[in-house]
Amino acid sequence: MFAIFTRLADWATYGVMGLAPNTRLGDAVHFFIEDVTKIFFLLTLVIFAIGLFRSMLTPERVRKVVAGRSRAVSYPMAVGLGAVTPFCSCSSVPLFIGFLEAGIPLGVTMAFLIASPMINEVAVVVLAAAVGWKVAVFYVAAGLTVGIVGGLMIEFFKLEKWVEDYVWKIRMGETVLQQGATTIKQRIDFAWGQVKEIVGRIWIYVLVGIGIGAALHGFVPQEFFLKYASADNLFAVPAAVLVGIPLYSNATGVIPIVEALMSKGVPIGTVLALMMSVAAISLPEMIILRKVLKPQLIATFTGILFVAFIGVGFLFNAFLT
Amino acid sequence: MKNFKVLGSGCKKCATTADLITAKAADLGIAIEIEKVTDMGAIMGYGVMATPGVVLNEVVVHSGSVPTPKSIEDWIKS
């Protein structure tokens, strides 16, 4: 199905640019061209298609749906809706306050915030196209589970005391839910607007990710990864997670790196643990959340995710390779 | 005179939104008042959870993204 992008890259790399196949530079350039065309094509297609069918799924709506539910319902709902509701990380603060103000428990709110950057429908489709549906399904299942477990732990330790005091005092005004599109033309306009908005926001991460993926693919020999990142090396998974935590990228931007690492034989658990830790939490995100969370809660939250991602990595390495 | 408030905690998109509204009003030659609201309590007071938000004469007309030029024009002319 995606062979056309391979052929396009063949033509551009070996034909137009005259690079030789199976050389370092040839391989890297080929990877870059194939991924840029394939990923941006998929991004546009998937965002547009979803934009057509999705009525306005906004954080305000999610808040209304999740508030007042029992925990057995609200946790799965929070991670599920977190995965499909688009919101920019600069809205984390109002979203956090809005959830708590509606009486949604801290644990459920954190579950939403954990799952949201890790999983989104666009990243899942691109991941499936890059490394297969099986890996994509495991990634989603693991991400949702980590979200729920992380939220439950925060609830279990009763960490509400580490939320900034002013947060509890804010009272929210009546929310006006915006009307979704009704006519076909409105839907097409909305979907196209989504493409421009989301691609405009993430293209740089995707491009940088493809660049790193291409460099790994072309210039780092397979032996390097076999030596340092095989499943036998117990430090590989913790090291991957540790590297990923401060780094920020959109989930889609990590996928070319996932693709390159897997083609070099790095085990699936190590790669997915890296992807999760890059997408889920980052230094910029911590700085934003510092406005509502005390440092102790940020540290605990990061610690929980660190352990959870390592767990995911080891589990997948043990059972899927 | 129409009063616009742009809600947002100082992110780039909020600044863009305010600039777009100012520029469009200047284009159309219509005088408006515009202010940026950055206080989280005040933002939440409007019931907005996704920034940037736009308030026109104390009514929330938009939230969660940079608005389109078309909607900005409609607000200014409305």
Image (cartoon, rainbow, N blue to C red):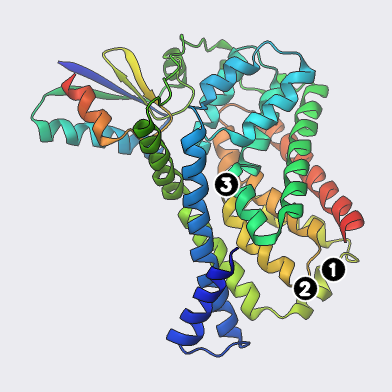
Quadrant of the frame with the C terminus of chain A: bottom right
User: Pointer 2: what residue?
Assistant: A225
Hey, which quadrant is residue A17 in on the image?
bottom left
Hey, which quadrant is residue A176 in on the image?
top left
Helix, strand or loop under label 1:
loop
Label 3 and label 2: CA atoms lie apart by 29 Å
Tag 3 and tag 2, C-beta contact below 8 Å: no
First along the sequence among labels 3 and 2: 3
Amino acid residing under circle 3: Val
x and y percentages locating residue A256 in the rendered image = 61, 62
Q: Pointer 2: residues within 10 angstroms few (<14), some, or many (20+)?
A: some
Q: Residue shown at 36%/24% (left/top)?
A: B62
Helix, strand or loop under label 2:
helix
First along the sequence among labels 1 and 3: 3
User: Pointer 1: what residue?
Assistant: A230
Q: Left or right of A100: which side holds B69?
A: left
Amino acid residing under circle 1: Ser
Residue A122 disc label: 3
In the rendered view, tell whether residue A78 sits above or below residue A211: above
Helix, strand or loop under label 3:
helix
Label 1 and label 3: CA atoms lie apart by 29 Å
Residue B23 in sight here:
yes
Chain letter for the residue marked with disc 1 in the picture = A
Q: Residue shown at 91%/54% (left/top)?
A: A319
x and y percentages locating residue A78 in the rendered image = 68, 26
Tell me whether marks 2 and 1 sit on the same chain: yes
Residue A169 disc label: none
Chain letter for the residue marked with disc 3 in the picture = A
Hey, which quadrant is residue A93 in on the image?
top right
In the rendered view, tell whether residue A292 sits above or below residue A174: below
x and y percentages locating residue B24 in the rendered image = 18, 34
Quadrant of the frame with the N terminus of chain A: bottom right
